């Protein structure tokens, strides 16, 4: 199976920065698209940023110009660099990886979530 370990969340003041990481381990044949989602209290989970296997990225309008997603395929890791953080960025952040295991179809795997809190 696949294990995802997220790290990098925490408490930061408005205007500050954080870097989230999500590392995958296991019998992985191929990592396809990767993404970061977030869920604030009382709200639905939403896509924050995504990156394809070829490196194409997409962002939610609310984070464009402030967040940057990247991946290190050799390390099976996806990152989210967050800058100019705002209180409305406060949420639990989850990574999602599209993974192909040997002799298995592609499937989605989610990280355990990491709390990001931005104080005003």
Image (cartoon, grey):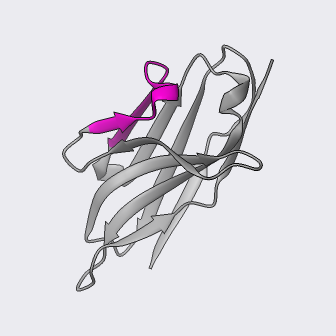
Outermost residue on the right side: it is: 120
**Residue 98, above or below 11:** below
**Residue 4, above or below 71:** below
Q: Position of residue 31 (x, y in %)?
A: 29, 61
Quadrant of residue 101 within the rendered picture: bottom left
Quadrant where the image shows the C terminus: top right
| Residue at (23, 86) in percent of width and height | 103
Quadrant of residue 13 within the rendered picture: top right
**Residue 94, above or below 30:** above
| Residue at (50, 27) in percent of width and height | 63
Q: Nearer the viewer, residue 40 or 115?
A: 40
Q: Position of residue 4 (x, y in %)?
A: 52, 62
Q: Which residues are magenta?
A: 57-71
- Position of 70 compared to 83: left or right? left
Q: Position of residue 42 (x, y in %)?
A: 76, 50
Q: Position of residue 53 (x, y in %)?
A: 23, 50
Quadrant of residue 90 within the rendered picture: top right
């Amino acid at each position: 199976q696949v294990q995802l370990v997220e790290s990098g969340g925490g408490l930061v003041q408005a205007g500050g920065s954080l870097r989230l990481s999500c590392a995958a381990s296991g019998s992985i044949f191929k990592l396809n698209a990767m993404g970061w989602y977030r869920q604030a209290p009382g709200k639905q989970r939403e896509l924050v940023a995504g990156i394809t296997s070829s490196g194409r990225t997409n962002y939610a309008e609310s984070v464009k110009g402030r967040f940057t997603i990247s991946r290190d395929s050799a390390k099976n890791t996806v990152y989210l660099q967050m800058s100019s953080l705002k209180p409305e960025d406060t949420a639990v952040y989850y990574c999602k990886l599209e993974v192909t295991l040997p002799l298995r179809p592609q499937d989605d795997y989610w990280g355990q979530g990491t709390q990001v809190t931005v104080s005003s």
